Image (cartoon, coloured by chain):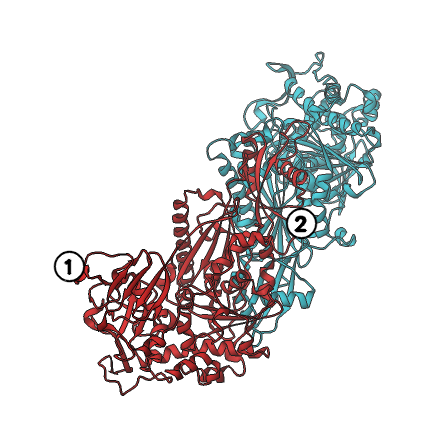
Chain colours: A red, B cyan
Amino acid sequence: MGKKVTFKPYDITIEVEEGENLLRAALRAGVHINASCGGEGVCGKCRVILEEGKVECPETSLLSEDECSLGYRQACQCRVVSDIVVRIPPESLLDKKTITRRRTGVSLRPSPINVAALKEEGLYNPAFQKKFLKLPPATLSDNVCDLARLEQGLSRQFGLRNLTLDFLLTRKLAKAMRQEDFQVTATLDFAQRRSRNPRLVDIEAGDTTGRHYALAVDIGTTTVWVQLLDLAKGEIVGHAADYNGQLSYGDDVISRIMHSQKEGGLATLQKAVVNTINKVTRELLKRHRLPVEEISHLTLAANTTMTHLFYAIDPKNIRLSPYTPAACHVPPVRASHLGLELPKHVFIYSVSSVSSYVGGDIVAGVLASGIYKEPKLTLYIDIGTNGEIVVGNQEWLACAACSAGPAFEGGGIRYGMRAARGAVEDVSVNPETSEPMFMTIDQVKPKGICGSGLINLLAALLEGNILAPNGRFREDLNTPRIRESEDGREYVLAWADQTASGEDLTVSELDIVNLMRAKAAMFAGYLTLIDSVGLKLQDIDQVILAGGFGSFINLENAIAIGLMPDLPRERFQFVGNGSLWGATLLTLSRDLLEEERRVADMMTNFELSETPGFMDQYIAALFLPHTQEDYFPTVTERLRTE
Amino acid sequence: MGKKVTFKPYDITIEVEEGENLLRAALRAGVHINASCGGEGVCGKCRVILEEGKVECPETSLLSEDECSLGYRQACQCRVVSDIVVRIPPESLLDKKTITRRRTGVSLRPSPINVAALKEEGLYNPAFQKKFLKLPPATLSDNVCDLARLEQGLSRQFGLRNLTLDFLLTRKLAKAMRQEDFQVTATLDFAQRRSRNPRLVDIEAGDTTGRHYALAVDIGTTTVWVQLLDLAKGEIVGHAADYNGQLSYGDDVISRIMHSQKEGGLATLQKAVVNTINKVTRELLKRHRLPVEEISHLTLAANTTMTHLFYAIDPKNIRLSPYTPAACHVPPVRASHLGLELPKHVFIYSVSSVSSYVGGDIVAGVLASGIYKEPKLTLYIDIGTNGEIVVGNQEWLACAACSAGPAFEGGGIRYGMRAARGAVEDVSVNPETSEPMFMTIDQVKPKGICGSGLINLLAALLEGNILAPNGRFREDLNTPRIRESEDGREYVLAWADQTASGEDLTVSELDIVNLMRAKAAMFAGYLTLIDSVGLKLQDIDQVILAGGFGSFINLENAIAIGLMPDLPRERFQFVGNGSLWGATLLTLSRDLLEEERRVADMMTNFELSETPGFMDQYIAALFLPHTQEDYFPTVTERLRTE
């Protein structure tokens, strides 16, 4: 149940989740309250007066008893538990201008991906199925081998013939068949791509059709996600995640590839990610009290480099021109062969990649979002450590990787960091005073700024006219927050006494150039792909944002700095972890699984650096939001009216 | 070039291979010379006079210089190197009767199985083939993954599509393709049973089509054979063999199965046979100076128990009623997975079994001999540790295992032994004196009697009227060679001072009962199978003998004791190691490989103990040669005329 929060004197009301932090609610509503400790509650600047309703908050020494009884609260310490009305005290009142500049937090439409939808569409049909068989017991007049008896049963009871067999099964058959008087459950795989024959995967004594699980795994360069699926009930049981163990060997795919070229490097990286998957899977199974033996399948999606490293396939040529992966389609392989702690009969199916920098994670996302079967023209954007884009519809799909660099994951930015504890996330800047208001993840002293924080800060500085469209800070502002540095001018987001490190937390013009390059690469990518098929940006019917990053992004701010195209906001939707969803859906739907390679083959890869026009588009995009104002009509309009 | 040997005064001439031992030539010609040291040259009894031609022989103290100059030689020490005439000295002359009773050594027609015949029949078409590809080098405008480039090449150059891929290949591709500028050789497997798609097995840099080898393996309960095949030239390179390392854990399949039920027993047996294959293969490769990397395939044939043990599939139920194997068809599995020292891309294909006691070795023999595609009615007999028989033609095949027991491999016979150094092999008995003449393998002092020796001895005793048709020794013979013992009467083949052990070497009536049971089980098996389809023994157009044993058997003697049916001798032929030949031909012919499972499925298995009439036939056959004389017309005729 959402709760309403009304901010006086502006009479701005927004709806928030029960338990939402009040300072965050203010940030989302575009209501500025000075707050410079990141939400830790130590600066005491974010005072508000609670006029109606209830909040939960701890006692604090920064407010006197009198103040408390008058309704004063520290916004960063309050959790909203009913509809409330709060007043920003007069000392913090801002002029009208600030308020009108507020950006409504565009709430992205939730993704339509779920099991119920799959069932509705008639696509719920897992490739892995269990069949219960009552076989006639062996006698002297009918003493065919156990395998033949099983095959006969599958043929007679289910019309299944010409099965492909897993060798290891021959070792389990005799015992399993005799344990419950020739009543057995066979696990079958109907997904053998490139072959019409179902594959006999496993056999168990008795009727185990009610217990049947599978895993869907997304190996991100940074994070590994594992989703546990109940194939008997057709439900998602749960998921868990952890940092990719390869992080110790480099933050991005290039540094990982370089590490793989060292003596033993490939094996080390392979083991690292396998260990992570094992650990996350163990946790997940423990949490849901499931024995690992009941898992019969694993579907995997990852970018091309992560896929190579997981399989211990040398990724060397991904990094070297002309950027050829060894294999975009990896044949099924026994999970235990790669060191995964899963039953011997579990094979790994991985989603096909398209090219060195458009991997199975993107193909999985395309499959999950269904854009390959829709008439609408869709732009699919995944911003993670790299940026990948897909444009197209049911008839064609063009894709490219943008060498955006890791700026939006904090790379190449002096105080940039991943979205972890202490990262500045929500931020606004008072255009009159240039004073910031921000919150950190877990509300502790700020350590650095994460990607969404950088976008929000950049947008705030730009719209507050503190930063010029060319990425330079204005020289005429009378504030200690802007000062000279080795990296051009810089803006001080938090003073040393308020930060975790005890240093000033700043964003310099050099940082801003790096962010502009990254967003320019993305935007030039969209335009180039769209242009290559003779269309225009306005022809895009739908924009789908994927990736962990996408879930925290403030769309309005991302458009304001020119990272996202300035299209009607209702055309945007957020798909979450498209890669994990894709892997999940492939596990739940044989029909989708069978489309997998066709969709990958349908995606035409563009090497942007080789594509005419890209460089011009890139240069033109090195401006906030863009040198061509007509690409950003609403942003231009807003900046102009201020 | 054969050499002629004429024996005077009988004027019997036979043709022998150059270098043949003269005593053996006499045995084959039915010319009796007393010789009781097994050919070691120490008894000096086998004196002959060389009248014409030349022999090679060492000097001996048992002949004086005078005797030598008169032409005396020790037959057991002579090798025939030219046409010769030898005279049996008067002191050894036998009466006419003995001579007329001699049995011409039926020389079995050589098997038609060979690569040339396969090529003539248009069946030479190995499932594993190498294809040389010149691929276009990768460029920025054509940077598909290496695997896709390879697939495109195979499609464009050879029209091959929809390949099944071996996962491990993805790890080799990138390096192999760049080593010789995108010129590579792909190894393909066109044998994927149950699927139409060729399988991509391996890739190598450059053109390696000229070097391509495979192995055919026969795992016998006693001996493991490995044949090395040159798939590039279509030639058999050579073979090697060794005792099955499992022999330490039991002589026959039943004792092996029992060992497999002990803690760790199955793994021990699996390792033992794998070690043997590894050892034999190493020797073979070393002898032919071939690197193991050039082997791309292994085809295996073995009886059902040996197959289970090789794959570490529990064979428990093979031994327990109702005698169900776990799997008669084992899916292909990576050789290295089972511990074979072969390249990672080598998979094992094994010949399907029919039942617990009619295994892949028999199916391989049926395939090798081609009886499944001939209109002639054929009886296929394999006598090894067990006896298996197949009857049929292109329309139907019936098969059965005869619980013959290991008598013909020396089991259950007091001085029985395998055909190894010191085993009595060729033997005849002087019907007048009951004195024996025999030769041992490697011509050393006798240690025991092997299967073919037992058959020859039994036939000699029977035809010399020393043994009665009911298996009892005559009581009225005045010879110290026949005497009472704990096991009934017994015949002394060699006295203690002439044997390796220093004990008398004997054959007792109990031994003879065991031999009669074994041969009765075989003969009753033929009759039962033939009868079950409403045919008679005389309808058999062709008898094929298989198995190591068959190569040493004296056909006439085997018929004389009732082990083989008394059919016109020209209907018999010897196929050698049918199992090894079958595995070889399957490696050389994709067409045969594709027939393999169909032929196994075509073979109807009879459990003889459950088949009406078998026990009566068995009882009737417990006689030498048989209670019904009309089954053995020529033997009866000969015994009658003597």
In the picture, the quarter occupied by the C terminus of chain A is: bottom left
Q: Which residue is mark 1?
A: A65
* Whether residue A341 is situated above or below residue B78 in the rendered picture: below
Q: Horizontal and vertical percent for residue B496?
A: 57, 23
Q: Horizontal and vertical percent for residue A399?
A: 54, 71
Task: Tell me which chain the residue with mark 2 is part of.
Answer: B
* Whether residue B584 is situated above or below residue A630 in the rendered picture: above
Labels 2 and 1 positioned on one and the same chain: no
Q: Is residue A567 visible?
A: yes
Q: Amino acid at mark 1?
A: Glu
Res. A205 image quadrant:
top right
The residue shown at (78%, 18%) is B627
Graded by Cα atoms within 10 Å as few (under 14), some (14 to 19) or many (20 or more), the crowding at tag 1 reads few
* Whether residue A324 is situated above or below residue A174 in the rendered picture: below
Q: Position of A205 compared to B478: left or right?
A: left
Q: Which mark is residue B193?
A: 2
Which marked residue is nearer to the observer: mark 2 or mark 1?
A: 1
Res. B136 image quadrant:
bottom right
Asked which secondary structure carries label 1, the reply is helix
Task: Tell me which chain the residue with mark 1 is part of.
Answer: A
In the image, B292 versus A285, the foreground residue is A285
Marks 2 and 1: CB-CB under 8 Å?
no
Measure the alpha-carbon separation of dots 2 and 1.
85 Å
In the image, B272 versus B288, the foreground residue is B272
Q: Which mark is residue B87?
A: none
Graded by Cα atoms within 10 Å as few (under 14), some (14 to 19) or many (20 or more), the crowding at tag 2 reads some
Q: Position of A430 compared to A610: left or right?
A: left
Q: Horizontal and vertical percent for residue A480?
A: 22, 81
Asked which secondary structure carries label 2, the reply is loop
Q: Amino acid at mark 2?
A: Arg
